[in-house]
């Protein structure tokens, strides 16, 4: 009886590409032979001068797949950046650690410590596992260099289109969440101003950054997310240990806390927890730029261990310090009950962090719209194209600002982002692609386990999305 070939591990060696396009998988893989032209470093991914996908080819009705003479990318280019083990680890931490940490204490409040910590541990383990599955898919063929490439190889161009739309909506909601977070933070610093007025001012200040020709100038500020998260943890520990026992904000205070949730609002914590572990759309780029991809699994293990420790410390410390007074963002609790210079400084860091990321997160959506408009503007002058670029980004920013005005709720947006879109990108799609590419090599128990994980994740995502709509209150 022939034995099944074992699928490659996440850090396995990548086989060279082949010219044979006979099998369905090879025909799908033939459409990603252009993958070397996708941005594979952070700087390349955020600069508009880099060549981008030709989305017009995705919209054609012709069944013909792209090939070397008619690729989806406009022009291939060489990529030379490589990162070491620790460099790749820092990249993963930088991608994951950000604004998601702010709502973790509130997640403990609505779910209780037992369920909240269980979700935090479980989501971290699952996200790490699916990151390894993506690595195994990348190791199976050298032509796979990005998240859309993996989906394309597994499900073809239609799968790629669906995932692209999911990612675009996810990025749109993330930008909305950024505006709400900055507005909430500034409202605590300037309580006399109306939140709607602050949101308009914030949008007007951020808007010029979206017009930059080269967004790489903002990439160096991306470390502000890691620094602000670490500063928040240190501030929480300092306040909790120095506040006199018995007062609100002391870690020794017997604050009213719950081990188990007593209502159905616990489902909000599903999205609030998962959004902090979502970075899978970027993992293939990190894998492709490692000087030794065999260390990819170790990179994920170290990064998720660090991230999980920081998240657990912030979540538990924040909830124990304030109990049922924990607000939607832990920084609001700090400024309300324990104001001071350090709290103000951390609040400014957290407010500035989304401002530096807004243009970068908006860029892929705007770029796709510009590609769709390209046939109408290919003969115009460079100045006109730049004005068109600014107009597209301005219109998108206005749409995001209107959405933030209509739904000015950080917890609701974060929970929706995590429960629906992060659940799809982090859990469902990686498992589905892995099953599709390696089904013939997997033991039945592995197939059953992955299918069960997908089913449970879909159920949790549905429950979390309902909770985000039913429980918009923030305190």
Image: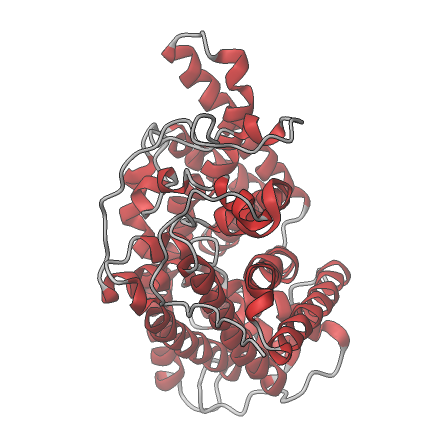
Can you see residue 193?
no
Q: In which quarter of the image is residue 381?
A: top left
- Residue 294: image location, x then y, percent: 31, 67
In the image, residue 110 sits, relative to residue 84, either above or below, namely below
Residue at the spot x=56%, y=24% of the render?
A: 372
Q: Nearer the viewer, residue 23 or 146?
A: 23
* Residue nearer the viewer, 220 or 185: 220
In the displayed structure, would residue 453 be above or below residue 228? below
69 with respect to 217 (left or right):
right
Q: Which quarter shows the N terminus? A: bottom right
Q: Where is residue 72 in the image (x, y as percent from the top left)?
A: 48, 32
Quadrant location, the C terminus:
bottom right
Instruction: Specify the quadrant of the image occupied by residue 396.
Output: top right
Residue 342 visible, this orientation:
yes
Residue plotted at (55% across, 28% down) = 57
**What x and y, as percent, mark residue 23?**
57, 48
Locate residue 96, reporting x and y percent.
42, 62
In depth, the one of 282 and 101 nearer the eye is 282
Left or right: residue 21 compared with residue 220: right
Residue farthest front in this picture: 1
């Amino acid at each position: 009886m022939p034995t099944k070939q074992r699928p490659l591990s996440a850090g396995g060696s990548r086989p060279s590409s082949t010219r044979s396009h006979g099998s369905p998988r090879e025909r799908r893989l033939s459409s990603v032979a252009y993958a070397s032209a996708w941005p594979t470093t952070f700087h390349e991914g955020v600069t508009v001068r880099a060549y981008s996908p030709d989305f017009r080819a995705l919209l054609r009705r012709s069944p013909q797949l792209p090939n070397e003479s008619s690729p989806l990318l406009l022009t291939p280019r060489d990529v030379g950046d490589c990162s070491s083990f620790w460099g790749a680890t820092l990249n993963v931490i930088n991608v994951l650690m950000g604004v998601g940490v702010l709502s973790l204490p509130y997640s403990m409040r609505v779910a209780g410590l037992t369920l909240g910590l269980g979700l935090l541990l479980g989501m971290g383990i699952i996200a790490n596992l699916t990151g390894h599955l993506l690595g195994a898919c990348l190791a199976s063929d050298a032509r796979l260099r990005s998240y859309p490439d993996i989906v394309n190889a597994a499900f073809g161009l239609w799968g790629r289109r669906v995932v692209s739309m999911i990612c675009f909506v996810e990025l749109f909601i993330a930008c909305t969440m950024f505006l709400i977070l900055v507005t909430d933070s500034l409202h605590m610093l300037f309580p006399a101003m109306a939140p709607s007025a602050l949101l308009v001012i914030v949008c007007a200040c951020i808007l010029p950054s979206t017009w930059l020709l080269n967004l790489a100038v903002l990439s160096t500020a991306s470390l502000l997310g890691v620094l602000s998260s670490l500063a928040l943890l240190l501030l929480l520990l300092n306040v909790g240990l120095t506040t006199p026992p018995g007062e609100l904000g002391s870690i020794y205070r017997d604050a009213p806390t719950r081990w188990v949730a007593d209502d159905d609002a616990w489902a909000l914590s599903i999205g609030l927890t998962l959004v902090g572990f979502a970075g899978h759309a970027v993992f293939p780029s990190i894998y492709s730029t490692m000087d030794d991809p065999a260390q990819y699994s170790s990179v994920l293990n170290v990064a998720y261990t660090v991230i999980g420790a920081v998240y657990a410390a912030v979540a538990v410390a924040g909830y124990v310090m304030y109990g049922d007074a924990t607000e939607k963002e832990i920084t609001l609790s700090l400024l309300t009950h324990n104001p001071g210079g350090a709290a103000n400084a951390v609040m400014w860091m957290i407010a500035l962090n989304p401002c530096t990321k807004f243009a970068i997160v908006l860029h892929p959506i705007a770029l796709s719209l510009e590609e769709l408009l390209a046939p109408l503007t290919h003969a115009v002058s460079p100045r006109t194209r730049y004005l068109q670029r600014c107009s597209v980004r301005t219109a998108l920013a206005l749409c995001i600002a209107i959405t933030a005005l209509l739904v000015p709720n950080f917890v609701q947006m974060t929970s929706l982002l995590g429960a629906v879109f992060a659940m799809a990108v982090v859990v469902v799609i990686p498992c589905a692609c892995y099953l599709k590419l390696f089904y013939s090599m997997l033991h039945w128990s592995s197939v059953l386990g992955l299918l069960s994980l997908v089913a449970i994740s879909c159920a949790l995502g549905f429950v979390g999305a309902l909770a985000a709509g039913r429980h918009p209150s923030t305190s």
